[in-house]
Image (spheres, rainbow, N blue to C red):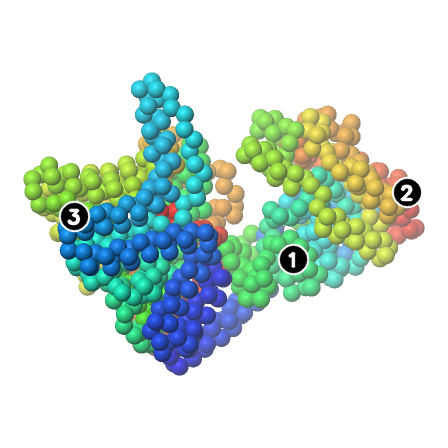
Amino acid sequence: MKRFITNIIVFTILLYFTAAFFDKIISIGLMKSETKIFYSLKNINEGKINADIIINGSSKAFKQVDPVIIDTILGVNSYNLGLDGGPFIPQRAQYEIYKLKNIKPKVIIQIVSNGTLRSLKDGFKDPIKFAPFLNISEVKKNMKLTGSFNYWDYHIPMLRYSYFPFEIITGTLSFFNIQLFKTKDLKGYSPENKFWSEKSQDKIGISNKIKEIENSNNLQKVDIFTSLDSISCENFESFIAECRKDKINVILVYPPIYTEADKTIKHIEYFDKIAKKYNIPFLNYSRDSLLVYNRNYFYNSQHLNIKGASVFTKKLSEDIKSLTNNTLNRNKKKIKVN
Amino acid sequence: MLFNSIDFAIFLPIIFILYWFVTDKNLKLQNFLVVIASYIFYGWWDWRFLSLILFSTIVDYVIGRKLRMEENQTNRKILLWTSILVNLGFLVFFKYYNFFLDNFITAFTFFGTDIKANSLNIILPVGISFYTFQTLSYTIDVYKRKLEPTKDFIAFSAFVSFFPQLVAGPIERATHLLPQFYKRRTFDYSKAVDGMRQILWGLFKKIVIADNCAEFANQIFNNSADLSGSTLVVGALFFTFQIYGDFSGYSDIAIGTSRLFGFDLMRNFNFPYFSRDIAEFWRRWHISLSTWFRDYLYIPLGGSHGGTWMKIRNTFIIFIVSGFWHGANWTFIVWGALNAVYFLPIMLTKNNRKNLNTVAQGKLLPTLREFLQVLLTFSLVVFSWIFFRAENMGHALSYIGGIFSGENFFNIIPKTWGGRMQSDFAFSILSIVLFIIIEWIGRDKEYGIGFLNEIKFRILRWCLYVLIVLFIITFGGSSQDFIYFQF
């Protein structure tokens, strides 16, 4: 028995250190990985962004706001940090890494929508992108709110990479500077070069995910997907307060929603209230007549395609320009809001 | 409690320490600990159904005692049937009530009589088919005087509820497992190490093979109407490996865990996918259930003795009952019947005991003839699994129709699968290939990696164990319930 127990202990120690070794290699590798889901975080972590303006948000930022247009119109350096399928708390976690490794931005364009402050009960898309950064306390704190990682993921090496063979392989290769998949650098922007289809028509009035959920007669889940979650709201407010303290100007932006789906436009009053409370601008394009009646600008009811994104970004940039009296360029004057 | 859960990873060492360090001096206390551990293990899922196990234990214990004292054959038969009715009564109620009701209503509607009856929202207690058959084997063996009924209620309770095999087998015989509770167990180092190794292999099969295959099998079976013939073939193959990895993986963990506590459980799988004919497959697949049906149903019905029609009848009965044991659905019945159809020609030509040894024994590779035999048997098995996996008969038939429709047959990867899904798909195929190679190397051992014990260099052996553990941790599929829990 003594021999058995001793062997089990020795084996466990050996296993722990081997796992810790591989965990380190994969984590370092993923921090350098140029695959689509790690690309922005890699640039953030390497301190390569240092933008004047950052665009924060979900796919509604990621796919709809073109930093190159913003740069051209405002004469600044901007970067899109949009997280596909990511509500606010993961956006915050990403911003915390940004703050640690980059110079603070002058302006944050915070794209908001019906799902920004939703409950995280059903998780969010690709939480694995935060796995290499769990040792950063602010990231850990935010990830704990999402429930995407369990207790053991934080304490046992390699567990956080369980069920992610693709990341394990690409992370290991990337550690040795072998990049199998490279992402085209569009300053974080990922436009959709596709147009409205029959499928989009079917899903009018409701986003794809909500529609699927509705089809399964689980209306309760629809509420979860577009609800205002108290923890997310609290986190959102503390973020705005912190930005104000850091003298970073936040502009809330609600992007255009295709007109026939206007019942999915939610929480306008809430964002309006927050804007007033913290004295920040709230630009609401959800029913903007330039965009929302033209189906050629959308690929589904919730998202603009590349053509629509271009029109939208131009309009947004012009509005920010007039809002700031064109003071962002070369840091001539401080931004003036409201 | 699932074997592949953190809960079990904590539970097992605690019970192990209590078993060998606290209760080892007192056999009764040690058996009592097994009972308590088993009830916690089962109650972790749903404590309410513990009463069913307890009730079944009391009924069979009491009937066993009475059978010993009773000499009158009629009274003995009444006692036996009481046990059968109580045990099967629970099983029928929980598992088959709604099935019978629905079919009863359908049959009457077919003849023009509308019957209104409400089906019940019944939760199927985990493992009920397994422990019911285990307790039945006790009463039947006592009735046949093959086994002396036990006086020791604690030992009997431990036999009925023994946690490693309680919810998904192997279905133990009282003649084999019960006596092990009467004797003092001593810790055997090599047995325990072998147990750990078998647990490791069971976890690999479950987490790496079954759980990864499950994702694709579910995806393909749930969207079968929109997919090409080749994708549907791949879906059936994924399910083939899912069910094997899942169920034989569970058995390996159960047998390995029992070894840690000094018990020997019967072997449940013997590399069934390397079988050269369907009879060999059934000697190697779910052995504890096949032999149960053989001993308690097939032989009492006359077995393979008697005329041709009797042989055909008995074969169909045993396969159809075996199919029905798996679940209350016509798909399981057709699956059983299809296997009977596969089996009959072999049995009627008296070739059913031709392949008793291991394929290509002592050789690295099989002959071309052996290879083709294995391939044909495997293909027949894969085809039958379509019925087993399908939601209903309509689904099974449309799935098979889809395979042979010929439309875009070679378009294996659907357009809807994104990059991640495609890479996971490639990874799952590679895992299956690796798995087949390891199982082939270890096919004359008790389990796939049994041969690792023969590696003399301890460091190399340990490195391979570490590698397997890391493989399980990192390349496992998202956790799925064990399929056989529902049976």
Instruction: Pinpoint residue A233: horizontal percent, then vertical percent.
Output: 75, 48
Element under disc 2: loop
Instruction: Pinpoint residue A303: horizontal percent, then vertical percent.
Output: 67, 35
Whether pointer 3 and pointer 1 mark residues with C-beta atoms closer than 8 Å, the reply is: no
Element under disc 1: helix
**Residue neighbourhood size for the residue with mark 1, other residues' Cα within 10 Å, grouped as few (<14), some (14–19), many (≥20):** some
Please, what is the three-letter code of the amino acid marked with disc 2? Answer: Asn
Residue located 26% across and 48% down the image: B82
Does residue A131 sit above or below B276 in this rendering?
A: below
**Residue neighbourhood size for the residue with mark 3, other residues' Cα within 10 Å, grouped as few (<14), some (14–19), many (≥20):** few
Instruction: Pinpoint residue A203: horizontal percent, then vertical percent.
Output: 61, 29
Q: Quadrant of the N terminus of chain B?
A: bottom left
Does residue B416 sit above or below B355 in this rendering?
A: above
Residue located 43% across and 74% down the image: B17
Q: Which residue is mark 2?
A: A338
Residue A10 appearing in the image: yes
Marks 2 and 1, how far apart at CA? 35 Å
Residue located 24% across and 38% down the image: B337
Disc number lying in front (2 or 1): 1
Q: Which of the two residues, B77 or B9, is positioned nearer the viewer here?
A: B77
- What chain does mark 1 sit on? A
